[in-house]
Amino acid sequence: MNLPKVITQLVNAQDNFDSTAYSNCFTDTAIVFDEGKTYNGKKEIKNWIEKANTEYQVTMKPLEYSAAKRELKAEVSGNFPGSPLVLTYHYEFEDGLIQSLKIV
């Protein structure tokens, strides 16, 4: 699968539970939408993913990527009810980094 470099970095950071590397995939003003909540900027994104890593130990297995739709379908597994699930990650990019991420 031909993923953008920043998406490959994001998946690797997630699978290694590295919240710093994960947040470094985002612009300083990035926004993440997940489970009805919004996280603004690298600091909030880092805190969100750090908490999720501690609680759920989520790993990602990319299944399908569409450059035209700017979306990734991935199987996520971890310590949460219903694991594993297939989620869709909708991205907006800016200067090679993620500006916006919506997880559904």
Image (cartoon, helix red, strand yellow):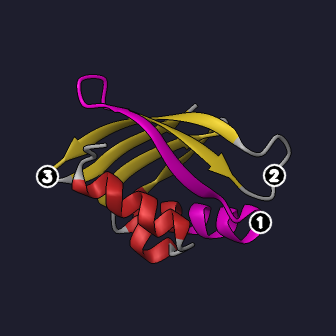
Q: Which of 97 and 13 is in front in this view?
A: 13
> In this rendering, does residue 43 appear at all?
no
Front disc: 2 or 1: 2
- Where is 54 relative to 56, above or below? below
- Where is 87 relative to 25, above or below? above
Residue type for callout 1 = Glu
Please give the label number shown on residue 6: none
Quadrant that contains the C terminus: top right
The answer for how far apart the CA atoms under marks 2 and 1 are is 8 Å
* Residue picked out by circle 2: 80
Query: Mark 3 or 1 closer to N-term?
Result: 1
Measured from the top left, where is residue 36 in percent x and y? 66, 35
Furthest toward the front, the residue is: 1
- Where is 20 relative to 97, above or below? below
Would you call the spot at circle 1 few (<14 residues within 10 Å), some (14-19), or many (20 or more)? few
The answer for how far apart the CA atoms under marks 3 and 2 are is 34 Å
Q: Which of 91 and 8 is in front in this view?
A: 8
* Count of marks placed on residues: 3
Residue type for callout 2 = Phe
Bounds of the magenta segment: 47-71
Residue type for callout 3 = Asp
Whether pointer 2 and pointer 1 mark residues with C-beta atoms closer than 8 Å, the reply is: yes
* Residue picked out by circle 3: 95
Measured from the top left, where is residue 14 in percent x and y? 52, 64
Element type where label 3 sits in the image:
loop
Q: Left or right of 70: which side holds 34?
A: right
